[in-house]
Image (cartoon, grey):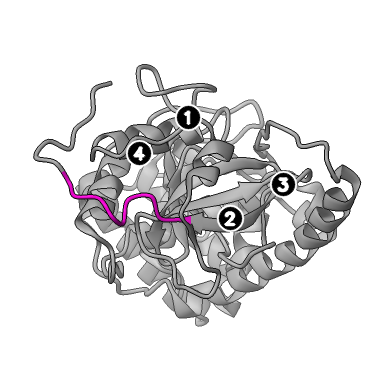
Amino acid sequence: MAAQGKSKKKKSFGRRWAGRLIKLAAALVAAAIGLVLILAAGAMYGLDQLASAATPSAYARATIPAKLLLTFKSAAQYATVQSGGEPISWSLLAGVAYEESGGFISRGTSDAGAVGLMQMIPSANQSYLDDLANVKIPGGATSPSFSNAPDAIYAAALKLEADGVAQGDLSQALGLYNCGSDWLHDQRSCIGTVGYVSAVLGYAQAFQAGYDTTGATQTQLAVLALAESELGTPYVWGGEGATGFDCSGLVQWSFAGVGVALPRVAQDQYNAGPVVSSVTPLTPGDLVFFADANGYIAHVGIYAGNDTMIDAPHTGAFVRYDQFNPTPGAAWGDEYYVAATDPGGAFVVPASTQPAR
């Protein structure tokens, strides 16, 4: 979890020595440009992508407890009325809760002092809870508490609205939620926050119905279904399914379930191709690849539409949805997007699509 000052750092591996200095310089420039693109996209995302009245997707209905789903919706409506600004989407609240709690599990107090489902730090956020003293929240405590899930969701909705959502700036709202006031002074010092924004927006988009699967083959849709079945599975370095997955292990396992044999590591999976032209729109089920500062392919995910992917991102995380900018060179954490491949477009799904674990 990463709330109001806590953060997570992605781990990259592999290196390529030929042309190392040139690639490093190019990567740093790309990362600087990409960070601006991600933050700018986040500033507009609430207006263009996350509908406040969106219908929950099948994934949302299967993942979010029914009572929590109702609370996310009512809290979003309440906070929007109170702020008078741009509406906050219930799916954004759900995305924050999922990322903070690791799957809608109300936690105790973290080492940083963050409490409950929404992992809010009381000393920094008490005013939002005080604003709820006379509000009748379904399932709320007699005296509002961050340990009470409905109370915390309402308080988080007020905070997110006040911190940027009301002005349409989701990156600022999520940056402040994850990193506190440091986000305003030095965004680069908030290690992991760009990844946090990506994860929250990825989940928020996945919780909404209406994914565009135009052009996806039966095989690609089956791959996505298999990857979705592992959402919440822990990241394990070198994992292939028994106890968890790393990024390429998840990809290999998902494609094995539809009869497509892929190499084991991300670089080899990229080399296996076929590469999708940068001017061709991505199709759900494509593989999307990211390189480290040395130009080595260090991460892979399965494209899920709407600029999101399903991936196993790093140690300490779980298989999840992540948002990314599919522009070659755009930063994603401490890596940058390279290209996509379409290993499943030409295959036919066999009768059984559930691989062994």
The answer to which image quadrant residue 214 occupies is bottom left
Query: Which dot marks residue 264?
Result: 1
The structure residue drawn at horizontal position 62% and vertical position 56%, both measured from the top left corner, is 338
The CA span between labels 2 and 1 is: 29 Å
Crowd tier of the residue under label 4, counting other residues whose Cα lies within 10 Å: few below 14, some 14–19, many 20 or above: some
Q: Amino acid at mark 3?
A: Asp
Depth-wise, is mark 2 or mark 4 nearer the camera?
4
Q: Which residues are magenta?
A: 341-349
Q: Amino acid at mark 4?
A: Leu
SS of the residue under disc 3: loop
The CA span between labels 4 and 1 is: 20 Å
Query: Which dot marks residue 295?
Result: none
Is residue 317 visible in the rendered structure shown here? yes
SS of the residue under disc 1: loop
Q: Is residue 171 above or below residue 102?
A: below
Depth-wise, is mark 4 or mark 1 nearer the camera?
1
Q: Earlier in the sequence, mark 3 or mark 2?
A: 2
Q: Earlier in the sequence, mark 4 or mark 3?
A: 4
Depth-wise, is mark 4 or mark 3 nearer the camera?
3
Q: Position of residue 262 (x, y in %)?
A: 40, 36
